[in-house]
Image (cartoon, coloured by chain):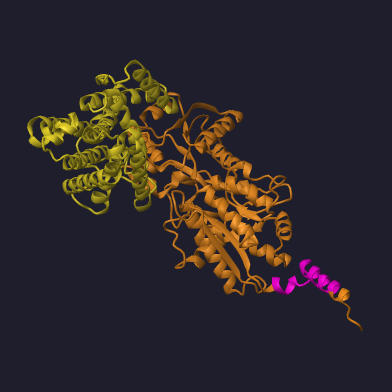
Chain colours: A orange, B yellow
Amino acid sequence: MTITRRGLGLGGAGLAAGSALGLALPALAQSEPLRVGWLAALTGPSSAPAVGFNRGVMWAAEALNAAGGVKGRKVEVITRDTQGDPTKAVNATQEMISQLKVHAIWGPTNSGESLATTAIMARGKMPNIHPCVVNSLIDPKKYPNAFRIAPSNIQWDDAVRNYTTGVAKAKKVAVIGDTTGYGVTAANDSAAGFQKDGAEVVYKANIDSTQPDMTPDMLRARNAGAEAIVIWSVSTGMIARMLNTRAKMGWDVPFIGHPSLSSGEIAQLIEKPDYWKKVYCIGYRSCSFDANGKLPPRNEELLRKLAGKINLQDTLLWWVACGIDAVNLIADAAAQTGSTRNDDIIRYWNGVKSWPGYYGEYSWTPDEHNGYPGQDVVMSDASSGRNGAFALAPGYA
Amino acid sequence: MLASILASGLAVGAVYALIGITYNTMFATSRVMSFTAGQLGMLGGVLGSLFILRLGLPVLPGLVLTLAACALLGVVTEIVAVRPVLKSLDQHLYVLSTLALALMIQHTAALEWSTEPQPFPRLIGLGEGIWEEKYWLPVAACAATILGLEYLYRRTLVGRAFVAIAEDNYAARALGLPERNLRMASYALAGAIGALAGFAGGQLLLAFFANGPLLNFYGFIPVALGGLGNNRGAVIGGLALGLFQQAANFLVGGIFSSVAVFTLFILVLLAAPQGLFGAAAARRV
């Protein structure tokens, strides 16, 4: 056979095209690690959740690798500390997509950052799981790549409202938020929800969280006849001041609302431990102790596995469990599809039904990317924290 | 309700007044509005909590160490953020330099202390209800500061030298007064006064890194209301601000109380641009 210059050129071009089309990829793909991008606000003012998530992420990756990885492929977590800054989160997202070539991204873990990065990930068709609550972050048409594994604001709102009117039997409520964007929006949405359900919002206010004296607002709420105070704020200082004021007024109205009501910081700021009674915060059935002081069996087992390896005294169990679930969901997509292509991971997640995680059982469809089961959002006794978990509030079976 | 307005209004007002005096003390010898004043107040609460609650020191050594640390920071402010820009006061570069230092102080406090409010200890354990010490301590601290400053400025040589520098620093220098040392001393004094504000108001404001901007802002209003450099004006302005703010909290509440405060502030400045107790600035023609 004569080898002509033209033949050699065509053959070379064919080989190059074949490589580009992926004919040589399987061997490479089977050996390269599964790269998980982890956008974490590990330092800065809002770092507590990400620190907790991170413990779960690292534990899950180590457990997977110790068991031989995902079909023989090592799981590599690539972390970028965003410091809670949307600009840094955007830069890290760009880096992960274009330079680090991660296969999926977990995070960011706060809504401010997520609002900045979601559209960028959608443009890059990057499979993304996050736990941020802002409703607009999930839209399967605009962001077909984004999946939520925590409740949305609507689910939080529903849980608080159902408990306030259904269990606490309060028909007249005071809804109080702080003056941040979140506090104002959440308080407005919550008040509208109560009114829609036939409850009377007798007092609604947004309080500057640095206001030293909460007596004016608490007096107005009491004079208006409030039977429960619904709180939407992450400010532990404001919450503690309100609890101190409630006690000094000799008023035993229940406080119901945001998970920050259970923050350990509050224990240090209230004047007496009793002032933290009758305070119920949003919690999760998977991470709640029952009347016998037991978690659901799957998470009792998790506690045993984590014992001595992860400190749960200064964090929340659901943060750790959610971090574990996120890594496992990415690994499971790669294992089940045998692929780390974006489309395959997203297609797999779109078909997930009652996926058994530690934090929840997630279900997604092509039209619904809110994966957390609403009935598992419950209210917890805010002062009952132990091992990062809480007792169910009174009224639950 | 009236008792509550008076108790917490006067307490918060006294803290604002002390921050106003901090501004004035720094201004008197340098003609610089240093925006580190609020951060000194914030540090008064944070360091007080650190020394007494975390390190377990008794109250008095805790107070002395807090005042000393903030006095030192006052001197650092003079060296780092004020002295380099004194030659170009008309360009108002001190706004940038003091704001930059204030931000550095605030971020350091956030990183090294906590981003969440921390408890401040009960200091004496006297009083209940509206007579609780958290309400009267700031007022007592404010009264003691004013009396102390009056004594210093009227009865001591150093105090008279401060006044001389404040009146005319060129003439004071010509008379052989050590202007730079006196300026540093006044910044140290201002640091201690700012720290006292945060320490006395610690039970109200908590030990919180974010108190700095709040105190910067609300502490500036008494200065503007009372007239720049006028300590008695700052005290009256501060107490009036605290009472008005607390009354607005009771009557209109929430965000609207801040709107009410700033509306009044703007109205007063429109009516008396030099402040209620300040003299109109003379202009050489």
Looking at the rendered image, the quarter that the N terminus of chain A falls into is bottom right
Q: Residue lying furthest front in this view?
A: B285
Q: Residue lying furthest right in this view?
A: A1
Is A195 included in the stretch rendered in magenta? no
Tell me what residue is drawn at x 67 percent, y 74 percent: A31
Residue A207 place in picture, x, y as percent: 43, 32
Query: Is A53 on the left or on the right of B262, as rendered?
Result: right
Depth check, front residue: A166 or A379? A379
Q: Residue lying furthest bottom in this view?
A: A1
- Type of secondary structure dominating the magenta stretch: helix
In the rendered image, the vertical position of residue B273 relative to residue A381, given as above or below: above
Depth check, front residue: A392 or A373? A373
Q: Residue lying furthest top in this view?
A: B271
User: Visible in this render: residue A273?
Assistant: no
User: Visible in this render: residue A282?
Assistant: yes
Query: Is B72 on the left or on the right of B268, as rendered?
Result: left
Query: Is B148 on the left or on the right of A82, as rendered?
Result: left
Is A24 included in the stretch rendered in magenta? yes
Q: Magenta region: which residues? A: A9-29
Residue B1 place in picture, x, y as percent: 32, 23
Residue A132 place in picture, x, y as percent: 57, 48
Query: Is B100 on the left or on the right of B191, as rendered?
Result: right
In the rendered image, the vertical position of residue A40 relative to residue B145, given as above or below: below
Residue A275 place in picture, x, y as percent: 36, 41
Where, by quadrant of the figure, is residue A28 drawn?
bottom right
In the rendered image, the vertical position of residue B6 relative to residue B60, given as above or below: above
